Image: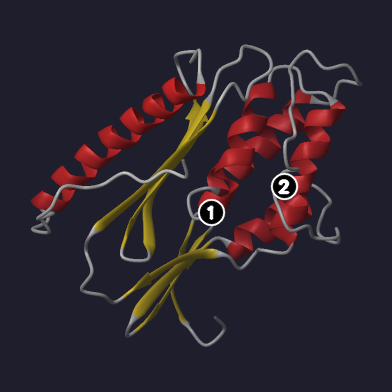
Amino acid sequence: MTDLRLLHYYLGVEVFQRPHHIFISQSKYAAEVLQQFGMQDCKPVLTPMEQNLKLSKFEGGEKVDSTTYRQLIGSLIYLTNTRPDLSYAVSILSRFMQEPRDSHWNAAKRVLRYIQGTKDFGLLYTKTKNFVLGRYFDADFAGSIDDRASTSGYLMNMGITEVSWSCKKQATVATFSAEAEYISAWEAACEIVWLRRILQGLGISQAEATSLFIDS
C-alpha cells in the first residue's frame, strides 16, 4: 500500500485513499506496541493464539507484573479498532488482568508475534454498489474452564468490507452447545437491528430480511 496517499493520522489510526477505495490501518501504532514491549525483532507466527488453548485464572506458574500486562492488553484492545482478527485472542486474554500468570503473558506475547507478521493489516473499503448487509456468527461452547461460560462472536459486513464485529463472554452460562449458538445468534440479531436502523437513517434501506450464517 506504499503508493497510497496518506490523508490522516490520528491516535494511531492511518487513513489512505485512492479513487476506488479507502484503507484504514494502525501499522505505525502496531510497530510502536512491539517496540514498547521489546518484541520488535521477534519471529512472527501465523495465528494469534494456539489452537484449542485453554487458559484459567487459577493456573499455577509465576505471577507477572499486572501493570505491564494491563498495559499490553489495553494496547491490543485499541488495535482491534482496525483488526477484527485479534478480537478473539484479546477477549480471552483480557479476562486475566487481575492476577496474570506467566502462561497468560506467554499467550499475550504470541499475539505480538502474530502482529509482527501482520503489521500492515487493516480494513479496506472499496467503491461498490453492493450495500447488502452480511452477517456471520459463532460460539465457543463452554470455552472458559473457570466458569464454563461460552464465548460469542459475530462479524458484520457490507459487500466485502467489515463494518462491525464483537467477541465476548456470554452473560448466561449455556447448558448445551445449541443454547450457546442461540445466545450468539440473539446478540448478532440485536446488532443487525441496530445497523439496519442506522442504514435506514442514511438512506440505505435493506430491502430484504438479513440472514444469519453459522458454520453448523
- Point 72% across, 47% down: residue: 111
Count up the numbered dots: 2
Earlier residue among tags 1 and 2: 1
- Give the side of residue 2 with respect to residue 61, left or right: left
- Location of the N terminus by quadrant is bottom right
Whether residue 45 is situated above or below residue 4 in the rendered picture: above
Secondary element under disc 1, as helix, strand or loop, is loop
- Point 43% across, 29% down: residue: 181
- Point 69% across, 56% down: residue: 115
Residue wearing tag 1: 83
Residue 35 sits in quarter? bottom right
Q: Which mark is on residue 114?
A: none
Say whether marks 1 and 2 touch (CB < 8 Å). Answer: no
Label 1 vs label 2: CA separation? 12 Å
Closer to the camera in the image, 76 or 165: 165
- Give the side of residue 77 with respect to residue 114, left or right: left
Q: What kind of residue is marked 2?
A: Val
Secondary element under disc 2, as helix, strand or loop, is helix
Q: What kind of residue is marked 1?
A: Arg
Residue 195 sits in quarter? top left
Tell me if mark 2 has few (under 14), some (14-19) or many (20+) residues whose alpha carbon lies within 10 angstroms of its own. Answer: many
- Point 74% across, 50% down: residue: 112
Q: Which mark is on residue 111?
A: 2
- Give the side of residue 133 with respect to residue 64, left or right: left
Tell me if mark 1 has few (under 14), some (14-19) or many (20+) residues whose alpha carbon lies within 10 angstroms of its own. Answer: many
- Give the side of residue 47 with respect to residue 131, left or right: right
Residue 201 lies, in percent from the top left, at 9, 50
